[in-house]
Image: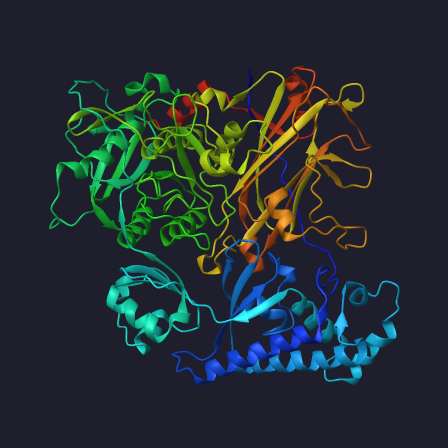
């Protein structure tokens, strides 16, 4: 086996984007006609009339634009509403029922709505007089200059040529305008309101709903009881962006068998890392109690039963002593200390209250890097928005150098299929359960999140009829099964990689996903929904080492500008060719915005890796042509948003690109420049500053197609090219960890 290598010492270079604006582009599949503009103009007039007659508690209007495709940022309104600042007016985004088209909600002033109606009317006049009431892509782009003089005549009308073309482009991507309302909730709920530039408390007060500040989760999200919901939906149903029922029940742990009383010995803790656990209550009478620092956060006036201590105690027992209780799952990671926060009982609990508690817990325990949350809702997540609980976890992880491990939730009954919150958290490591044979369990629920993100991230052994997971509960040893008991094993591995081996969370997460995915390029949608990227190996040594015909190395840096690149990877050459296939797995923790609905992640990092061609461009191992420019800085290739998402996982915070090893693979030719390169291209949906300072971690694997071990040559080449190479030598890192954490007594 070869050790995984860390490459350090050569920083990535940062450069700004130099692409020149190419002007608006029309939807090539659409022909814009007078009839369509007339219809849209009439619809805007109806919406204007509605808002003029509506007694609303805010100035401005809400309008939902139904696009005719999944619309990239460049395809969205750029002439109507607020012109080139219309993107800043977006307050929500969802998909249609078939999830093939965007529905995006804007908040604009009444004056901007009136101006948009005028722009449509003026554009329609030009279209009728100069272009016979119809325009397609050929006329719009005028590559043969047939219509150049005609376009110049636009200046004689109320709209200039540039504005005319932008409005035509806008219309080509629009199906309709609407005022959308959310489905009414009948139980107390966590409700997110559209941003109308008014403080949420003041906005609700104008509607006759007076709420306590403690019931506000963030700027737009509040907790409302049934009476308050009735008032809101009666007076202003169009204000509701999203709503979910608040009361949650702990996803059931299936197949719990009889307890066995058993005396077990355990040494006292020493320098082991601490993992945070947020769960139900912990029974301090169990044998491993010295390893657990317990904080109970349930009100003393709330009655508690023995059942309230089972789940939390069992989860912590896996983190502390799981490898001893389950020798077949001995991962080589040893024991871990636990700081356990009891935030829920085994019955119903308020997810709103727990979410607020989690923010407080993390703020007061910044020394812990890995947190396990095996609580989950029985309710299915929504296709069009992230749950409030998951959004808070994502926000916390973006703002703090921590990672949550979240259970994928269990089926409460056969009618519930999709995962429950907070298993839709994008930045978290979400874990589903498999049997001892590596097959999905009958209690596992399915992703994905927002019809796109691969949730769960990975799978692990959670117990089944073949082999249950042994845990310690208050009454002794128990045999259990559930995603709750798969997640703690992944928390152990992450803590080992981060707290003992010293890796950052981006690299640690990427390593686990890379190990689970292996060389599988295209798992089926059903496989992704159940297994995520795959089943993580049991032994930690199989994650931090690799086969002898493979070179696996780790790279991490921070994106500061549009292009973050390094062209100094000295891949060994044999007979003037590269006898390898390659893969790369990248993870990062972007800022997210729940009110943007399906457009949830603010920042996109796109990784390219491959040989440097004679033109200085990377020949990407997956053939990714996103963000390619010519020498003039002009974009050379166009991919639709659907293609970019499907083929290159655009907007996903986990990237996996791979060449599949086959017996027919031939060595790659070399170019003049012999090193390989990596580029990280950064794009932002809203604020350009959202992507500044985002750290990424990439795991790269080179597989020699003839089975030859070339790692020594690679290490030698790296040193010659100025890299510092560290091998992930487990024993060495453990010794260093112990040394660093030693207590020194001064005489």
Percent coordinates x, y for residue 600 in the rendering: 49, 54
Give the image's coloring scheme: rainbow
Q: Is residue 746 visible?
A: no
> In the picture provided, is 268 more to the left or to the right than 701?
left
Tell me the quadrant of the picture where the C terminus can be found: top left
> In the picture provided, is 532 more to the left or to the right than 209?
right
Identify the image quadrant of residue 79.
bottom right
Tell me the quadrant of the picture where the N terminus can be found: top right
Q: Residue at x 62, y 50 (%)?
A: 642
Percent coordinates x, y for residue 60 in the rendering: 48, 78
What is the tally of numbered marks visible in this picture?
0
> In the picture provided, is 295 more to the left or to the right than 656?
left
Identify the image quadrant of residue 619.
top right
Identify the image quadrant of residue 229.
bottom left
Q: Compared with residue 534, is residue 266 higher up or lower down, i.e. above or below? A: above
| Along the line of sight, the residue nearer the viewer: 357 or 636 | 636
Percent coordinates x, y for residue 530 in the rendering: 45, 35
Q: Residue at x 51, y 34 (%)?
A: 510
Q: Is residue 353 visible?
A: yes
Q: Residue at x 81, y 31 (%)?
A: 671
> In the picture provided, is 502 more to the left or to the right than 41?
left
Q: Compared with residue 407, is residue 38 higher up or lower down, i.e. above or below? A: below
Percent coordinates x, y for residue 701 in the rendering: 61, 27
């Amino acid at each position: 086996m070869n050790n995984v290598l860390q490459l350090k010492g050569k920083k990535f270079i940062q450069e700004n984007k130099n692409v020149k604006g190419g002007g608006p582009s029309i939807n090539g599949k659409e022909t814009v006609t007078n009839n369509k503009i007339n219809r849209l103009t009439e619809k805007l007039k109806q919406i204007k009339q509605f808002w003029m007659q509506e007694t609303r508690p805010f100035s401005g209007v809400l309008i939902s634009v139904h696009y005719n495709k999944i619309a990239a940022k460049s395809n969205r309104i750029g002439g109507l509403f607020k012109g080139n600042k219309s993107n800043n007016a977006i307050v929500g985004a969802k998909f249609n029922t078939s999830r093939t088209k965007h529905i995006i909600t804007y908040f604009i002033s009444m004056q901007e709505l009136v101006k948009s109606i005028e722009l449509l009317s003026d554009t329609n006049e030009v279209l009728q007089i100069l272009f016979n009431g119809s325009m397609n892509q050929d006329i719009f782009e005028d590559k043969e200059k047939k219509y150049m003089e005609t376009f110049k005549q636009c200046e004689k009308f109320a709209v200039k040529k540039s504005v005319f073309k932008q409005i035509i482009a806008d219309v080509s991507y629009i199906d309709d305008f609407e005022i959308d309302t959310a489905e009414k909730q009948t139980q107390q709920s966590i409700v997110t309101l559209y941003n109308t530039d008014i403080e949420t408390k003041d906005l609700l007060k104008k509607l006759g709903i007076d709420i306590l500040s403690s019931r506000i989760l963030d700027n737009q999200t509040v907790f409302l009881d049934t009476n308050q919901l009735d008032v809101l939906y009666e007076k202003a149903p169009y204000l509701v962006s999203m709503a979910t029922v608040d009361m949650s029940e702990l996803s059931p742990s299936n197949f719990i068998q009889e307890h066995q009383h058993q005396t077990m010995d355990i040494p006292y803790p020493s320098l082991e890392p601490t993992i945070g656990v947020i769960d139900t209550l912990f029974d301090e009478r169990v044998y491993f109690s010295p390893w657990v620092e317990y904080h109970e956060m349930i009100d003393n006036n709330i009655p508690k039963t023995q059942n309230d201590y089972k789940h939390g105690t069992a989860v912590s027992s896996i983190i502390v002593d799981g490898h001893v209780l389950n020798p077949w799952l001995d991962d080589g990671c040893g024991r871990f200390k636990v700081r356990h926060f009891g935030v829920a009982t085994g019955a119903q609990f308020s997810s709103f209250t727990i979410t607020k508690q989690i923010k407080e817990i993390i703020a007061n325990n910044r020394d812990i890097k890995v947190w396990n949350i095996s609580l989950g809702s029985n309710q299915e997540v929504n296709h069009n928005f992230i749950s409030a609980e998951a959004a808070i976890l994502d926000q916390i992880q973006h703002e703090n150098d921590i990672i949550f491990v979240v259970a994928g939730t269990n089926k409460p009954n056969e009618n519930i299929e999709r995962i429950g919150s907070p298993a839709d958290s994008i930045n978290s490591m979400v874990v589903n359960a498999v049997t001892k044979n590596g097959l999905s369990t009958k209690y596992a629920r399915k992703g994905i999140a927002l019809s796109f993100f691969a949730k769960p991230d990975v799978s692990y052994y959670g117990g089944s009829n073949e082999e249950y997971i042994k845990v310690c509960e208050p009454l002794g040893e128990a045999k259990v099964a559930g995603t709750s008991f798969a997640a703690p094993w992944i928390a152990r591995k992450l803590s080992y990689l981060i707290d003992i081996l010293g890796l950052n969370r981006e690299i640690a997460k990427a390593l686990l996903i890379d190990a689970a995915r292996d060389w599988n390029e295209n798992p089926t949608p059903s496989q992704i929904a159940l297994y995520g990227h795959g089943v993580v190996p049991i032994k930690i040594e199989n994650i931090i080492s690799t086969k002898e015909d493979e070179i696996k190395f780790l790279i991490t840096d921070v994106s500061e500008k549009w292009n973050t690149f390094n062209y100094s990877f000295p891949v060994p050459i044999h007979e003037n060719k590269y006898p390898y296939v390659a893969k790369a797995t990248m993870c990062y923790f972007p800022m997210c915005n729940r009110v943007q609905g399906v457009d949830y992640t603010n920042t996109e990092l796109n990784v390219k890796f491959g040989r440097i061609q004679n033109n200085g461009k990377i020949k990407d191992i997956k053939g990714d042509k996103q963000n390619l420019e010519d020498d003039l800085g002009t974009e050379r290739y166009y991919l639709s948003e659907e293609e970019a998402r499907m083929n290159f996982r655009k907007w996903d915070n986990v990237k996996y690109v791979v060449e599949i090893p086959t017996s027919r693979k031939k060595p790659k030719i070399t170019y003049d420049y012999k090193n390989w390169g990596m580029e990280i291209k950064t794009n932002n949906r809203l604020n350009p500053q959202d992507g500044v300072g985002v750290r990424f971690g990439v795991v790269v694997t080179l597989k020699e197609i003839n089975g030859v071990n070339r790692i020594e040559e690679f290490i030698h080449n790296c040193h010659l090219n100025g890299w510092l190479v560290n091998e992930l030598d487990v024993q060495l890192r453990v010794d260093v960890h112990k040394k660093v954490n030693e207590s020194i007594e001064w005489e």
